[in-house]
Image: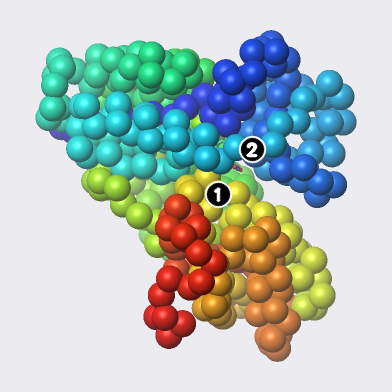
Amino acid sequence: MRKIVHLDMDCFYAAVEVRDDPALRGLPVAVAWSGPRGVVLTANYEARAFGVRSAMAVSLGLRRCPGLILVTPRMEVYREVSGVIREVFCHYTDLVEPLSLDEAYLDVTVPKQGPPSGTRIAERIRREINQATGLTASAGVSYNKFLAKLASGMDKPNGLTVILPDEAQGVLEALPIEAFHGIGPATARRLHKMGVYKGSELKSQTLEHLKEAFGKAGEHFYSIVRGIDDRPVVAGRPYKSVSAETTFEVDLNSLEALVGELAPLTQQVEARLEKAGLTARVVVIKVKYQDFRTVTRRRTLPYTVHASGALRQEAEGLLRALTLESSVRLLGVGAEGLIAVANAEVGQMPLFSASG
Ligand code: TTP
Ligand code: MG
């Protein structure tokens, strides 16, 4: 049986800002790009107590928490801290799969040093991270990735949760389906319509039924609710693409209406690229018609979508070039051709030939 640890820094960007400016300690802080259309990247726990959340408009954050202190992101500092925590991980295993700057899976089945206990290794890693960075991390320990990630979120901040094999079934059965990683709001709504609100109810669905309703994702749901997840921890797996999509409550039937839905999607993609320290050279849009037929359009850019707003502009261009064949139930935006920002910054010139 494998020993998997999922580590996740606590309110990462905000924690770095409070660490570096002690005057902020104890006050509600959000990290956000400035401007009227700014979005909260993250908030500390003081701000979360007022209902301030990641991906929330700054304007709403200020309404919920009038005393909210806004800090501009310092990506280079977050990247540096990210490097430090990755070094700590490597003291224990080379099987480290980063998910973003502040989060990683570790396979510590055969650790390089330390006790042969996933729990005690996770404890040591949390302590070393704290000593090296002054920041806290939460950890989850279990026998697969899905359960380890679930566990790391159960006692945040600064917590450690272990899900043992004989506890997994009970935890999963009691879990509200929204809390299953990979079940988004649209899927959750559909499951609710099927009368499925928690794990035990998901578990009572047949594989055939779930496949019919959700395709390949349905098979995944069938497995994870049984605590089955054979995905290996793949060291340093690079992202191939980053995307965001939304299923509309009511199908849309004009390009204009679709264009109006782009901004939150491109902002999510931009935020995730930023978080991973990546930029992109290929923009993709995806449109799913009411009959589930899907079309995608992509464009390779002669530059990276570094500049804020570039992704939105390009996605809008691709969308406007479409002729809608019927009403649309889902819109997606993706970024591919990903490059580490560190490399892209060497120059604004394309790093690869335009045909690549
Ligand atoms: P998360 O680990 O999702 O959040 P967090 O570390 O701020 O808080 P938690 O204690 O719940 O783990 O994301 C890590 C960082 O990534 C976060 O500090 C800011 C950034 N981020 C964005 O830029 N946009 C987003 O939508 C999210 C969710 C995070
Ligand atoms: Mg985090």
Mark 1 lies within 8 Å of ligand 1 (Cβ measured): yes
Q: In this view, does 55 lie to the left or right of 159?
A: right
Answer few, some or many: residues within 10 Å of disc 1's Cα (few below 14, many 20 plus, some between 14 and 19). Answer: some
Residue located at (27% from left, 39% from top): 96
Residue 73, numbered label? 2
Q: Is residue 68 left or right of residue 221?
A: right
Q: In the rendered structure, which amino acid carries the disc numbered 2?
A: Pro
Residue 81 found in image quarter: top left
Above or below for 276 versus 324: above
Q: Where is residue 27 in the image (x, y as percent from the top left)?
A: 73, 15
- Whether 293 is drawn above or below 204: the answer is below
Specify few, some or many for label 2: CA neighbours under 10 Å numbering under 14, 14-19, or 20 or more: some
Q: Is residue 78 left or right of residue 58?
A: left
The response on whether ligand 1 sits within 8 Å of label 2 is: yes
User: Based on the displayed image, in which of its 4 quarters is residue 230 positioned?
Assistant: top left
Which of the two discs, 2 and 1, sits closer to the camera? Answer: 2
Assign the N terminus to one quadrant of the image: top left
Nearer the observer, 114 or 310:
310
- Identify residue for label 1: 274
Q: Can residue 164 be seen in this snapshot?
A: yes
Image location of residue 36, percent across then percent down: 85, 47
> Mark 2 and 1 residues: CB-CB less than 8 Å, in contact?
yes
Quadrant of residue 8 in the image? top left
Q: Which residue is drawn at 61% across and 25% down?
A: 17
Quadrant, the C terminus: bottom left
- Name the kind of residue labelled 1 in the image: Glu
